[in-house]
Image (tube, rainbow, N blue to C red):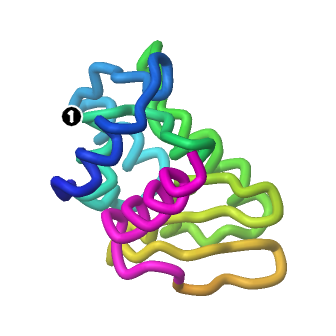
Amino acid sequence: MTEQIKKLIEEYEEPGDFTYPNASKELLDDAATTLKTSIPEQYVDFLCRYGHGGIGGIEIIGIGKSGTPLFVSETMKYRELGLPENMIVTENCDEWIYCINGKNGKIFSWSNESMEEAYPDFDTYLLDRYGDAAENI
């Protein structure tokens, strides 16, 4: 995770914005097994540092306070609607979702009608989404 992302979070975070779970390697390995894909390192870093949540209304799906990997249930729900098996849901934007490709770490926007590459990696995505949110706070 870049220093720029960490600084944005430090500057704009309010109490309760993130879950800060104790994410173990075993929990993440079990999640990857359930999802039948790898979890890219940049996303793993976010999950281990912050868990779930965000700033300025941008909520990254991750790990709940109780240690539940919320991204697994969200991903499985969207796979029933046609989300490709190598994708992991990271954000629900109502009309579409953002998801990370477990094979190459690229971020895609997906809806029932289309899928487009949106960002080259998770850190670029997070910086853009949180940066936009910070401008509107």
Secondary structure under the numbered disc 1 in the rendered image: helix
The quarter of the image holding the C terminus is top right
Is residue 118 left or right of 45 when viewed as pictured?
right
Residue 101 position, x and y percent, is 44, 71
Q: Which residues are magenta?
A: 118-137
Is residue 129 left or right of 38 when viewed as pictured?
right
Other residues around mark 1 within 10 Å, as few (<14) / some (14–19) / many (≥20): few
Is residue 15 left or right of 57 when viewed as pictured?
left
Instruction: From this view, report whether residue 53 is shown above or below residue 88.
Output: above
Query: Is 132 one of the magenta-colored residues?
Result: yes
Residue 135 position, x and y percent, is 52, 57
Q: Nearer the viewer, residue 35 or 124?
A: 124
**Magenta stretch: dominant SS?**
helix
Q: Does the rendering let one see residue 42? A: yes
Q: Residue at x 41, y 31 (%)?
A: 13
Residue 122 position, x and y percent, is 36, 65
Q: Nearer the viewer, residue 109 or 37?
A: 109
Q: Residue at x 72, y 57 (%)?
A: 93
Q: Residue at x 43, y 22 (%)?
A: 19
Residue 77 position, x and y percent, is 72, 49
Q: Which residue is mark 1?
A: 25
Q: Residue at x 75, y 84 (%)?
A: 114
Farthest residue to the top: give it. Answer: 66
Query: Is 31 one of the magenta-colored residues?
Result: no
Q: Does the rendering let one see residue 103? A: no
